[in-house]
Amino acid sequence: MRETLLELKDVALTYQTKTDEIQAVKNLSFSLKEGEFISVIGPSGCGKTTILSLIAGLMRPTRGTIKVAKGNAHFGYMLQKDQLFPWRTIEKNIFLPLEIMKKFDKAHIAYAEELLKKYGLYEFRKNYPSELSGGMRQRAALIRTLSFNPDILLLDEPFSALDYQTRLSVCNDVYRIIKDEGKSTILVTHDISEAISMSDTIIVLSKRPCTVKYVHEIPRGGDSPLKRREREDFHKWFELLWKELNE
Amino acid sequence: MKKKTVTQKQFSADHIRYLKKLRGRTAVVWTLGLGILAAALLLWQILADTGAIDVFIGSSPKRIAATIVDLVRNDNLFYHIGITLYETIVGFLIAVALGTLIALLLWWSEIARRVCEPYLIVLNALPKIALGPIIIVWCGSGSKSIILMAVLIGIIVTVINMLNGFLAADKDKILLLRSMGATKFQILRKLVLPGSVKTFIGTLKIDVGMAWIGSVMGEYMTSKAGIGYLIVYGGQVFKLDLVMAATAVLCVLATMMYLGVALLEKLLVKNRS
């Protein structure tokens, strides 16, 4: 039985604005197990990103609890665009979390450099982001996210800024790295096929105020995302999820 | 992908032709640019020599050159240049430093920002020369008042520009840093400051101009020396040769200071695409 890393229970969030009070999230409950890959899909504007902000502790829920197994676990946050700092070399970008967290010591630097080597960016460590292709930049962003060895990865549509070709291969790439490093992941996406190809579990959210509508366990049998797209049941899942999203 | 080490490559004939064309175009631009200046000076001189221009009012290139030589020999031109440069540079530095510092404080505190906003708008709209009499009464006649004028003219623009630059820091990058647990000070140091280098250089370029306006205007108000003083004095005694000679010197000085900032930009903005 895998350990539960993260548990959301009856989480609700209400925004206050000058003219209105907006309920963004209500009665949201789900949990993430160790090594699990969850995708969260939902109609656009339903507050998917808000959920990640809540989990990462950037916002406080109005009601409910978010429990993290390891006390104060670290979250690795990855956004739509790579968000590499253009004035820093790749290496310096990857060290950024270490500098922020005051972990800029030999052991952590060695670990980050190990990741650079393992995932083919070591020879580009002195280059600036503008000198790398979109796919490589996104890989650099992932390594930055991993450099401080977080327990849980939060991915906010990390591939949607890439063109289709690059997207498929980066998706594969990122999946392999995440599995290699044994990370637990929550991916927020609007792309149904991406969700099917990458996840163990798919959570379908309702319109705002968003709450969990359906949860699906996707059988994947160790296939890579690209392989997963070729499986017979891929279309069946796609149709089901499409229907559920548009209900 | 761009490689850093440029390998010696054998260029094709087409490429060499292309490079030649580029160089040719640059040569045309320079020739035309300098040509226009030379032609204008020549025409001016001819019109002055033939009497079409009254040299008493219109001066002439030759007379201006002679005046400059005379200023160097008899009136200690470099002393006047020194005074004006001193006032301009000190005013410039204070405006930049203090303006940037105020912008930082306003970036830090939203309340302070909202409180100061109407003041900034009023001060920005106010023609600073209107403060001249007050400045002279409070600071006396001389360099102190002139520097204050230069500071006043430069500082508001600096605050507004730099504040906008600081506030333009990418929201997603701030979110990313916050997810790493960054403090506000860390966000400032790692993102906002390094991200504002371009804005800073832009502001310096504007401030060079502002400092010159301030110092020359200050010298118009109250001074016993300096390039602005020479211009005003020349005007008062109707020596247009002196006015124009001093203006020419001013052109050279201001351009040199601007080029200095441009050089600084080259040093700072490497690799920051």
Image: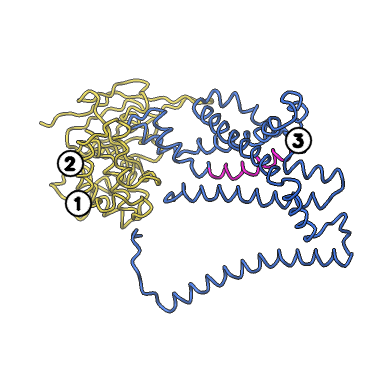
Chain colours: A yellow, B blue
Q: Name the residue under label 1.
A: A228
> Of tags 2 and 1, which is closer to the observer?
2
Q: Same chain for marks 1 and 3? A: no
Which is nearer the N-term, disc 2 or disc 1? 2
Q: Was residue B38 drawn as part of the magenta stretch in this picture?
A: no
Relative horizontal placement of residue B100, taking residue B1 as reference (left or right): right
Q: Is mark 1 on a helix, strand or loop?
A: helix
Say which quadrant the C terminus of chain A sits in: top left
| Residue name at image x 19 percent, y 36 percent | A107
| Residue name at image x 74 percent, y 53 percent | B68
- Magenta part of the protein: which range? B201-218
Q: Mark 2 points at which residue?
A: A181
Image coords of residue A236 (percent x, y): 23, 49
Find the residue positioned furthest to the bottom.
B13
Image coords of residue B125 (percent x, y): 70, 34
Amino acid on which disc 2 is placed: Glu
The crowd level at tag 1 (other Cα within 10 Å; few <14, some 14-19, many 20+) is many
- Tell me the chain of label 2: A
Say which quadrant the N terminus of chain A sits in: top left
Q: Was residue B208 drawn as part of the magenta stretch in this picture?
A: yes
Q: In this view, does A121 lie above or below A49?
A: below
Find the residue positioned furthest to the front.
B73
Amino acid on which disc 3 is placed: Ser
